[in-house]
Image (tube, rainbow, N blue to C red):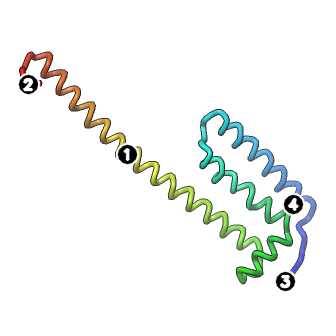
Amino acid sequence: MTNVLPSPETVAVISAFALIYMLVLLRKTLQGKFDLYDFLMLSMVAIIPAGFTLFPTLAYLVSHLTGVVFPFVVMFGALFLVVFAFMHNMTARLHRLERQNCALIQETSLLALELRAKESGQPGA
């Protein structure tokens, strides 16, 4: 198992990105633009690389346990897993909104029909 530590420049860049990105996400979550689930999933884009950079021993241990030579391969695999989980959730939300939209359109049409029937004075409406 290799134990090459990341350079100080790499640690500084990854840490700065993680801090700024997390602050932006937190601000948008507090403003109500994201919910807690979105905040957690999107924050993984910063947390996973920061974890692998700031804790290289843990990164090498995880890569060794998974049988992968390079820790960054495990990191990108974890990032892909997060992206696919996020996309799955977004797809489920989209389909739920489509069904809700269809139901609302149908209800609006029925209410409009009922209103027309009442305006024309037809009994039974």
Give the residue number, with chain letter if any, for mark 4. Answer: 10
Closer to the chain start, of discs 3 and 4, is 3
Task: Report the amino acid beneath label 3.
Answer: Met
Closer to the chain start, of discs 2 and 4, is 4
Give the spatial CA distance, label 2 vs label 4.
Answer: 75 Å
Residue 109 locus on image (x, y percent): 23, 32
Give the spatial CA distance, label 2 vs label 1.
Answer: 32 Å
Give the spatial CA distance, label 2 vs label 3.
Answer: 81 Å
Closer to the chain start, of discs 2 and 1, is 1
Residue 19 locus on image (x, y percent): 80, 47
Closer to the chain start, of discs 1 and 3, is 3
The residue lying at 71 percent from left, 72 percent from top is 74
Give the residue number, with chain letter if any, for mark 2. Answer: 124
Task: Report the amino acid beneath label 2.
Answer: Gly
Judge whether 49 appears above or below 102 on screen.
below
Q: Residues within 10 Å of mark 4 (few under 14, many from 20)?
A: some
Q: Are marks 1 and 3 in contact (CB under 8 Å)?
A: no
Give the spatial CA distance, label 3 vs label 4.
Answer: 21 Å
Q: Nearer the viewer, mark 2 or mark 1?
A: 2
Q: Nearer the viewer, mark 4 or mark 1?
A: 1
Q: Nearer the viewer, mark 2 or mark 4?
A: 2
Residue 98 image label: 1
Residue 43 locus on image (x, y percent): 69, 51
Residue 1 image label: 3
